[in-house]
Image (cartoon, helix red, strand yellow):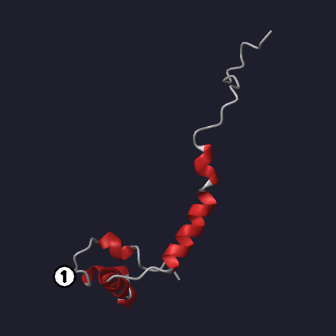
């Protein structure tokens, strides 16, 4: 007699539909490393990196954004973390 408190689903013998995707994660990771190492930076990316690198503080970064086209979040993503 089955336990009435057992609420687990019966085993149907079928694999999860997400299993094939999990098997591809290592290949995806290798592809991301390869493709990002061969990435050519565009002018707007170089400009954002330069503005973020040359700003000594976050307040100075915001002051340097007066004529930039991207949002401040774009530049904040290029700032280094706390030293």
Identify the residue at image location x=63%, y=61%: 26
Q: Residue furthest bottom?
A: 54
Instruction: Give the side of residue 28 with respect to residue 50, left or right.
Output: right
Instruction: Give the side of residue 78 with respect to residue 20, left or right.
Output: left
- Image: 26 above or below 23: below
Q: Secondary structure under badge 1?
A: loop
- Image: 28 above or below 41: above
Q: State the image quarter where residue 39 is shown.
A: bottom left
Q: State the image quarter where residue 70 is shown.
A: bottom left
- Image: 65 above or below 19: below
In the rendered image, residue 80, in percent from the top left (x then y), is placed at 47, 80
Q: Residue furthest top?
A: 1
Q: How crowded is mark 1: few (under 14 residues within 10 Å), some or many (20 or more)?
A: few
**From the image, which quarter does the N terminus lie in?**
top right
In the rendered image, residue 32, in percent from the top left (x then y), is placed at 53, 69
Identify the residue at image location x=22%, y=80%: 68
Q: Name the residue under label 1.
A: 67
In the rendered image, residue 6, in percent from the top left (x then y), is placed at 72, 19
Identify the residue at image location x=56%, y=73%: 33
Q: State the image quarter where residue 13 is shown.
A: top right
Instruction: Give the side of residue 35 with respect to residue 47, left or right.
Output: right
């Amino acid at each position: 007699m089955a336990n009435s408190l057992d609420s687990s689903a019966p085993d149907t013998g079928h694999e999860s539909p997400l299993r094939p995707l999990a098997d591809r994660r290592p290949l995806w990771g290798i592809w991301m490393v390869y493709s990002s190492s061969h990435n050519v930076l565009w002018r707007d990316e170089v400009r954002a990196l330069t503005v973020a690198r040359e700003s000594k503080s976050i307040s100075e970064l915001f002051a340097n954004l007066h004529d930039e086209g991207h949002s401040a979040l774009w530049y904040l993503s290029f700032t280094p973390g706390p030293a």
